[in-house]
Amino acid sequence: MIKIKHLIVLLVCTVTAFTSCKKKETFDVDAQFRADTTAIRAFIVLNKIPAIKDPASGLFYQIITPGSGTAKITTSTTVSVNYTGRFLNGNVFDQSNGTPISFPLGGVIAGWQIGVPLIQPGGRIRLIMPSVLAYGNEGKGSVQPNTVLDFTIDLLSAK
């Protein structure tokens, strides 16, 4: 009788252990990228933004002012910028508030690394980026996972 009780307890514990282990879901980057691209296309059509899509990365951008010069801007370039970051609903989540910030371009999100070199100092660019080029499915601070971001960036200098 004791053996049967032990077997039943063991069986219950085993079943509970296996059923309580939740299978780790795999994140589908391609599906998220397609959803983000659809949202961005709808946003730029609705707001009549003459954005261009970079075919290699999926970054949408609008060069507002190209700037001047022939600086070769790479991820090792230190840039000084003013910027505003918004969600597609227009809410600002981050900005430099007119106080320039400087940093190596390689230290920021991929969307910036791809978009900022498209202009020269004195230029202004708008980057509308799929979440994979921003904070991905992790998010950061007030940016929730899988969030499309819209930045306006003034490139003040590149060294």
Image (spheres, grey):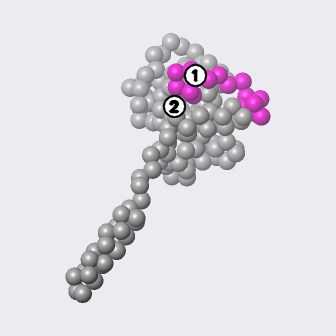
Instruction: Confirm whether residue 102 shows in the render.
Output: no
Q: Quadrant of the N terminus?
A: bottom left
Residue type (three-letter) at the residue carrying disc 1: Asp
At x 36%, y 63%, the residue is 18
At x 36%, y 68%, the residue is 15
Q: Which residue is mark 1?
A: 54
36 relative position to 9: left or right:
right
Q: Quadrant of the C terminus?
A: top left
Vertical order, 56 against 29 (above or below)? above
Q: Which residue is mark 2?
A: 112
Q: From which residue to which does the magenta span run? A: 44-59
Vertical order, 2 against 113 (above or below)? below
Frontmost residue, 92 versus 15: 15
143 relative position to 39: left or right:
left
Whole-percent x, y for residue 146 in the image:
55, 44
Residue type (three-letter) at the residue carrying disc 2: Trp
Whole-percent x, y for residue 67 in the image:
60, 19
Q: CA distance from mark 1 to mark 2?
A: 13 Å
Whole-percent x, y for residue 110 in the image:
47, 32
Frontmost residue, 37 versus 26: 26
Does the segment drawn in magenta span residue 40?
Answer: no
Q: Secondary structure at mark 2?
A: helix
Query: 10 Å neighbourhood of mark 2: few (<14), some, or many (≥20)?
Result: many
